[in-house]
Amino acid sequence: GIQVEQSPPDLILQEGANSTLRCNFSDSVNNLQWFHQNPWGQLINLFYIPSGTKQNGRLSATTVATERYSLLYISSSQTTDSGVYFCAVVTYSGGGADGLTFGKGTHLIIQP
Amino acid sequence: ETGVTQTPRHLVMGMTNKKSLKCEQHLGHNAMYWYKQSAKKPLELMFVYNFKEQTENNSVPSRFSPECPNSSHLFLHLHTLQPEDSALYLCASSQDRSQETQYFGPGTRLLVL
């Protein structure tokens, strides 16, 4: 099956800093999502981005499908950005619904 | 609020108990999913239902039994679980194609004693 690798596994930053999280995947995908998991376990959708670039406030994401990677940028970090960030993908299939394959996540800690 | 709800939020059960987890989505989606998140392991897919039909069973032991009576509801029936089944169980929904955003519920945190 497809492999999803995220880096770095852990990241500690001061409030106000910028960060870049990376997701590499081993095969072509038709679905790539970035999530933020809060301390209570809720997965919060950040981006659906199988290709191209999107921005939402201080967050932006870029997926280069031909090179099989995606980047999540967080600017001017706040303590509320702390948590685990997951990348998840679906490979091309017969067209019906398919489950996501998740990476192991990046654990981000923003210190005041 | 993602439009996907799960009950109960927390569950403690013995290895001989039978319990059920419930998921409901209010998004008009046709596909629903069960995922498992164990400590120190990536989130892993368990089951996929599309238009109430099971389309994927990711080699899940038979002590986990899913049920999808309609496109809005998904259950996970649990019986004779093991302590290693303790985990966060997450439900998700999407439209009926893989190129669609999946939305997750808040999860049920299960402890098997």
Image (spheres, coloured by chain):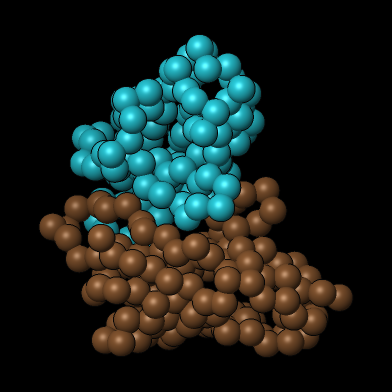
Q: Is residue B92 above or below residue B63?
A: below
Q: Is residue A109 left or right of residue A97?
A: right
Q: Quadrant of residue B74?
A: top left
Chain A painted colour? brown
Specify whether B55 is left or right of B111. Answer: left
Mark yes or no: residue A112 visible.
yes
- Tell which residue pokes out farthest to the right in this image: A112
Give the quadrant of the C terminus of chain A.
bottom right
Location of residue A89 in the rendering, given as x and y in whole percent from the top left corner: 35, 65
Identify which residue, A78 or B96, lies in the foreground.
A78
Residue B26 visible (yes or no): no
Question: Could you tell me residue B108's position as x and y percent?
Answer: 57, 36
Relative to B36, is A76 above or below? below
In the depicted view, which residue is nearer to us: B112 or A87? Answer: B112
Q: Which residue: 46% across, 35% down?
A: B24
Query: Where is residue A103, by image quadrant?
Result: bottom left
Query: Residue sitting at 61 percent across and 63 percent down?
Result: A84
Rendering coords of residue B62 (x, y %): 32, 25
Q: Which chain is cyan?
A: B
Q: Residue at x 25, y 60 (%)?
A: A1
Q: How many marks?
A: 0
Relative image position of residue A92 (x, y in whole percent): 20, 66
For residue A75, above or below residue B34: below
